[in-house]
Each structure stands twice: as C-alpha cells, then as structure tokens.
Image (tube, grey):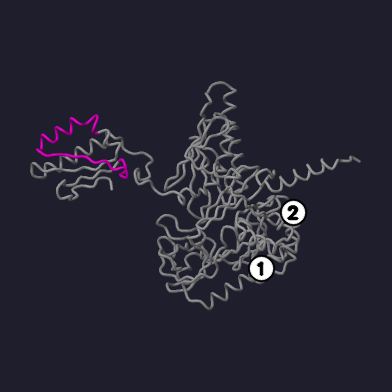
Amino acid sequence: MKIMSIESVKESVKETVKKILSFGRVKTDREIIINVEKLEYRVALLEKGKLEEFSIERTTEQRIVGSIFKGKIKNHEIGLKAAFVDIGFEKNAFLHHWDMIPAALDEEMEQIDRNGRKKSRKRIEVKDIPNLYPPGSDVMIQVTKGPIGNKGPRVTTNISMPGRFLVLMPFSDACGISRKVEDPKERKRLRKILENMEIPSDMGLIMRTAGVGQKERFFVRDLAMLVETWSDIERKMKNLSSPNCLFREPDLIERTVRDFLTEEVDRIVIDSATESERIKDIMGRISKRSVNRVRHYADPQPIFEKFNIEKQISNAFNRQVSLKSGGYIIIDETEALVAIDVNTGKHKVGGQQDENALLNTNLEAVDEICRQLRLRNIGGLIVLDFIDMKGRRDQQSVFNRMRDNLRKDKAKTHILPISQLGLMEMTRQRHAESIQRAVYVECPSCKGRGVVKSPESISVELQRRVAQIMRQNEPGREYRIFVNPEILNRLRKEDEDLLVDLERKYAGKLSFRSDAGMPIEHFKITDSVTNEELLVYGA
C-alpha cells in the first residue's frame, strides 16, 4: 500500500476541488450548455468541446410547432387537395387532405400489433375528406411546421405526443419501434416490453431511441404521463370553443431535457438557478439518478464564452466555412433551395496523391456539411456540389459517408447518389425557419443580394436623375443633394467637373450634404429654399 504524506493529500484535495469548481476544465465527451436570458434561451450541444447542435428560442415568440389546437375548417381548395383551418392566427393553417386521413401506419416505424403481428385496416381516401370535414367543422390539429415567410403554419390531424421514451399516437392503434434502433437483440427486448404494456384501446405507441437499454418501469411511467396529458386535451376539446389551444409544446429547456438527455450526455450546465431547479424537477420524475448531472453555472464570465461557444457560433454561421485540409464550403440559402459548394482551397489537381486528397477533402466536407445542417436548422431541398471525382468508387464513398452521418440527425432526411453532373440532392425535414433567417434580417442596403452598386454606378445614376429634374424645372433653381459619405467623396474628386457642367448647362446650382446614416445606394434631392423633396432614390 502506498502511503501519502499530509501535504500530498492536501494538494490532491485542492486539485480535485479546482476541477469540480472550474467547469471549463472538466473533460467530458458530450454535454449540454444552456444560456438563459430575459429575451432568449440558447442551447448548445458539445461533443468533446466542439459545437454539434445549436438552438435558439425567443421568449417573445409563440411556440406552436408540436402544439395541439381546436380549429375550424374555413374552406377547402380542391385543386390543392387541402383545407385552410382557423387556429387563431393571422394566417389560416394549411392542412393537406392526406394529412387528415387517420394514419394507422407510419413509414418511420416497424408496424406490429399487440400480439406481435402486422396489422392492416381500411383507409379513408382523399376524395372523402371534404364530405367528412365540411366548412365550419371543428377539428383537432397539431402544428407540424411553423409559419415561414408569408406562409401560414402546416398542420395535421394525425396527433403524436412525444414523451421521454415513447411517442403516443391517440388516433392510431399501430405500435412499433423506431427504425433507428438497429441492434436485433435490443429490438427483440423492446418488442417484448411493448407487448406487455397495457396500452389504451385505439391508441398506438412508438418506442424512441432514448429507450434503448431502459427498464420496463420507465416506459410504464412515461405512458401513464402521456395518457394523463391526452385526457386533459380531450377534456379541453369538448369544453372549449374554436379556435383555441389545447396543448402547448414545452419550451426549449424542457424539450432539451426530453429529447437530448440520454446516458451519452455527461452533464447539463445552465447559468440560471431557477431553471436549474426546474430541470432537476423534470429529470427527477424520469430518473432521480440523472439529477446529479445538472450543474448551475455561477461564474461572472458568460457561460457561452467560458465554453468557447460564442466563437464557434460566429465561425459556423459564416457563408464560407473552412476545413482542416485547407478546403472550404460555401453555403447559400435561397427561397427555393439551399446550395452548398465544396472547394479545394489549397489543393492542386494532378497525380494519384492529389486524387486521394480530393476524396479526403470531400469526405471531410461531408462531416462538416452534416454538422452545419443541424447547427443552422437548414431544411427543404439541398443541392451539394462536391469536388469532381472521376471514380464511381470515390463517389460511392462520399454517398455512404453522408448517409452514415445523417443517421444521428433527428430531422427526417432523404438523399440521392451523386449524379452524372457531379451533384448530390437531398431533402431535410423543416419544422421552422432556419437559424439564419430567424436571427438575421435583410440588409437595407443590398436587399438580400449580398452586393451593392459601386460609387461610380451611383454617381452615374445621380447625375442622370439630377439632369432630369433640372430639365423639368425653371432655370436658376437651387438643389440640395444628400448622399452617403463614400459617394460624396467620389463626387468631389473624380466627378466634380461633370457636376459643374450640369450647373452650367441647366443654369442651376447644386450643393451636397453628407449623411452617414444613408445607405450607399440611396440619395435624396430637395429644393434648397423650400426643402421640398423632389426625389428619394433607393428607398
């Protein structure tokens, strides 16, 4: 036995205390960092210190995705095969007719009945929907996608209520296990638990991936909580008038505990004492042992700076994202699709060694692209332009890498192999606006183009408009022109003689004023005496 001196013991204790108190120095593989502010909640998922997922929720915004409403059918659009539903918002919700058909089957699960056999039932057809739900009908719906741009929310009548380990489907009697659970032994164990559970009649269940390795009592407890919540929703459906909210999806912090906290997460660190206690209370209902993983961060340094998250967020949301190999990717979001371009950067083409380098750059780009999709919450149609690869084997390697990376993405995705044009197409489920569209607004100068006219172009336009106004008015009139300082600098140096010629030609007088708050593409022309606005350009 090794005997330590008193001094050695004291030093050991000091080091241990330092590690406990210093959040930034404790080495963890997977942790959740939560920043709570009055206007905004931010949640970051770190893996070995690297930002893998990031979410923002404003406290002033309504949480509607996942929420359940009692709505009223306003009208049917037969051409669109859809109904518009009043759920109490400015824009009516969009409800596809096929989303109004009770869903007994779900492509995301293995379908089995309570005896372990596949089950089928007669399905309602789309043509039956307008008769089943005429205008004025009350209907219970769940929001699947929030308002995006000028579009209203997307909703469905196929209600699903996620719990910690289960998803309850009140209008479907199909039960199953998430396809993301791939281990045959674990699937067999979960199937046995599912068959033993007392599930209310005409209700279905999906066992989530969070249930892997969990004991039966956790599933029973989760089911009881979901059924109790559903009973409350049914009671409100009967008693409340439409439109009305029957169930509000939990806030970002509670959803984080529900969806992310697994045995793989080492700890949750949060900078709010109040929310820390709330998380512990939520977790205590699920697993009292997990409560010890919650830490309240009380240091004066902002929590996202302490864990180097602010810098990672700033770097991650640039249009150009660098790769360790020297290459980089360009991400452009448009209304119709998202375009992602992979470039070699420092690599030069030529020789077998460089062929391998190009493949490795593409593989590295795949890892970063999948991370960026989660970080930015990018959805819809996505087109990827990888560095050209001659061999089909290399193209297949890139496709396989992309498919493997997307397995840990919670959003539904679908990808196609690299085409003859060297492009890979994919779709990713979109529940709400991307982080970029939620955080940033359109630039008032460039109007979203990303570029502005040069000072020379603005000078040409200004001279053209000044000449037009001077021609239309009597000679001798004085004009005052307000421009951006950069434009004024151009007018004073390169174009002064041209402006003097204008004054001489139309017998007028021009004076210029610098306005630092005016965008570079804007200028204003007024009458010097009356201050009447004659032209406001670019507004």
According to the picture, the residue beneath numbered tag 2 turns out to be: 186
What is the crowding at mark 1: few (fewer than 14 residues within 10 Å), some, or many (at least 20)?
few
Q: Residues within 10 Å of mark 2 (few under 14, many from 20)?
A: some
Q: Nearer the viewer, residue 125 or 335?
A: 335
Q: Which residue is mark 1?
A: 225
- Location of residue 22 in the rendering, given as x and y in whole percent from the top left corner: 67, 46
Q: How far across and down, in percent of the image, does residue 269 sit?
A: 64, 52
Q: Amino acid at mark 2?
A: Glu
Toward the viewer: 378 or 42? 42
Viewer can see residue 118: no
In the structure shown, which secondary structural element does the residue marked by tag 2 occupy? helix
**Residue at the extreme right of the image, as rendered:** 1
Q: Is residue 305 magenta?
A: no
Point 72% across, 60% down: residue: 287
Tell me which segment is drawn in magenta: 491-520
Q: Is residue 378 above or below residue 485?
A: below
In the picture, measured across the screen, residue 394 lies left or right of residue 381, that is: right
Choose top left, top right, bottom left or bottom right for residue 251: bottom right
The amino acid pointed to by label 1 is Met
Q: Secondary structure at mark 1?
A: helix
